[in-house]
Amino acid sequence: MKHAHTHDLEHDLLAAAQWCAKRGEKLTDQRREVLALLLSAQGSMKAYDLLAEIQKQRPTAAPPTVYRALDFLVTAGLAHKLESKNAFVACCDFEHPHHGLMLICDRCHKVTELSDERLAARLAEDAASHGFSVAAQDIEVRGLCRNCRDGDTEGAA
Amino acid sequence: MKHAHTHDLEHDLLAAAQWCAKRGEKLTDQRREVLALLLSAQGSMKAYDLLAEIQKQRPTAAPPTVYRALDFLVTAGLAHKLESKNAFVACCDFEHPHHGLMLICDRCHKVTELSDERLAARLAEDAASHGFSVAAQDIEVRGLCRNCRDGDTEGAA
DNA sequence: GCCAAAGCTGTTACGTTATAACATTTAGCA
DNA sequence: TGCTAAATGTTATAACGTAACAGCTTTGGC
């Protein structure tokens, strides 16, 4: 069993703020609020679900409010967009440049981000062999996580 | 320079129809029309762009017309969805089961689909090591194709 | 041939995802 | 202070995708 500990959350938010500062940017209230929601989420979150949460505090928040924060977080490497779900997740290790491999459980919706240098290397090799220069990559895998595959009855949709 | 030859197109459509028949399905007029558009396109096509083309022949066509055809083609393996662009491409080799790696040029928008068994194997290995069972995967790479990287001034957006 | 079932298509309406554009406020700093 | 750049507020709309139901067409059994 895993819990979202407030202490961990605060720690992560502090690290994120420092990371932004190092890049000459700021983790403003809105950005921090969105990041906190993503960090606390069990799986990924949709933009409009984030918006609904934000609106509990700021009833006037509108779509651009959350999309701006998300754009910032994704650009800063603090979050990733899951293209196959139109959803967002906090990055597990933003301090290291990496090209994550996303394992997305179709049953409990949990997302696990892996970093595999050899996989990335192989991919870069494939691209290079076609004269293609890589700017960004996205690897998403759908399926069942260990718990769900093994017949776990908790955490279903 | 590359051209879309009518002969190739007809050939591909015939092969697709046979592929469907083998699966106990039919490549109906609408499906064939959408597939033909995808096969003829230089890069990928958006659903509503396809719809606009379809409407030149059938002015009453509506979004479900094209989305149904696309769903069919994707399920049958005749086309792929590029999640990062919300766009669709014809599959380059639908007769062989494969997990394509998509190289998407950000400048000329051309899409190259590669199949790399070793890459797929490595990915499956990564997933398995986390107890994750893979149902589907999507690998998309953005960047510049050889021509665009080398300063080709044709085919820009 | 006739009927029933299944599959495909037509059509309307709506839900979801995302951004453009411009006004206003806030933060950093000479 | 007052300038400038960044961030946010606000409205409106664009872009992407689907639900639901009605009607048609094909297929296969009899």
Image (cartoon, coloured by chain):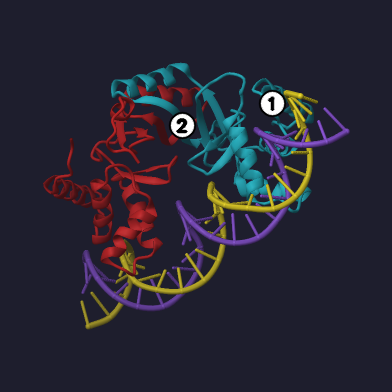
Chain colours: A red, B cyan, C purple, D yellow
Q: Amino acid at mark 2?
A: Asp
Q: Position of residue B101 (x, y in %)?
A: 49, 27
Q: Residues within 10 Å of mark 1 (few under 14, many from 20)?
A: many
Subunit under mark 1: B
Q: Position of residue C1 (x, y in %)?
A: 88, 33
D6 or B138, nearer to the observer? B138
A113, above or below C9, in the image: above
Res. A143 image quadrant: top left
Give the residue drawn at x 78%, y 48%: B57
Q: Residues within 10 Å of mark 2 (few under 14, many from 20)?
A: many
Subunit under mark 2: B
Q: Position of residue A30 (x, y in %)?
A: 27, 60
Give the residue drawn at x 33%, y 26%: A149
Give the residue drawn at x 45%, y 31%: B139
Locate the N terminus of chain B by quadrant. top right
C16 or A156, nearer to the observer? A156
- For residue B16, the mark is 1
**Left or right: where B7 falls relative to B111:** right
B143 or A74, nearer to the observer? A74
- For residue B138, the mark is 2
Label 2 element class: strand
**Left or right: where A90 falls relative to B148:** left
In the current view of this chain or complex, which residue is farthest to the left?
A7
Res. B131 image quadrant: top left
Residue B155 in view in this figure: no
Res. D5 image quadrant: bottom left
